[in-house]
């Protein structure tokens, strides 16, 4: 993700409650701090057999309970304002 349009889209995403953006060695990602609507009270997945591919591909070898994910973040934006400031520095023509 590098274009101005990519960052305009990311800005819209971080406007939403519980959504932050970060970059690590693998690229740009969203940090979604909300509970999945399919997570049951017993910790099981309500749609386990048809869960999305990203859930199927998740590797339990590494867990955020063992080490905070933020340790690997190169950039981390908690708010629209923080990301907007970054965009204005990254793109000299931002807002034009
Ligand atoms: S496996 Fe995926 S769909 Fe199921 S509860 Fe977890 S995040 Fe939600």
Image (spheres, rainbow, N blue to C red):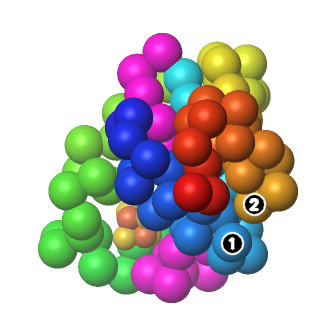
Tell me the magenta residue range: 25-42
Magenta region includes residue 31: yes
Q: Quadrant of the C terminus?
A: bottom right
- Residue that badge 2 annotates: 80
Q: Give residue 91's position: percent from left, percent from top.
A: 57, 36
- Residue that badge 1 annotates: 15
Magenta region includes residue 28: yes
Quadrant location, ligand no. 1? bottom left
Q: Are marks 1 and 2 in contact (CB under 8 Å)?
A: yes
Secondary structure predominantly adopted by residues drawn in magenta? loop
Binning the other alpha carbons within 10 Å of mark 2 as few (below 14), some (14 to 19) or many (20 upward) gives some
Q: Quadrant of the N terminus?
A: top left
- Residue at 78 percent across and 44 percent down: it is 85
Q: Is residue 50 left or right of residue 89?
A: left
For residue 7, above or below residue 65: below
Given residues 12 and 36, the one toward you in this image is 12
Q: Is residue 17 left or right of residue 3?
A: right
Q: Is residue 65 visible?
A: no
């Amino acid at each position: 993700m590098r274009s101005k349009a990519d960052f305009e889209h990311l800005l819209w995403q971080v406007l939403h409650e519980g959504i932050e953006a970060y970059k690590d060695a693998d690229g740009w990602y969203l940090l979604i701090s909300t509970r999945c609507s399919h997570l049951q009270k017993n910790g099981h997945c309500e749609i386990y057999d048809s869960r999305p591919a990203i859930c199927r591909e998740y590797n339990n070898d590494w867990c955020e309970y063992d080490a905070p994910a933020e340790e690997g973040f190169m950039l981390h934006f908690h708010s629209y304002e923080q990301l907007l400031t970054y965009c204005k520095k990254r793109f000299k023509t931002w807002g034009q």
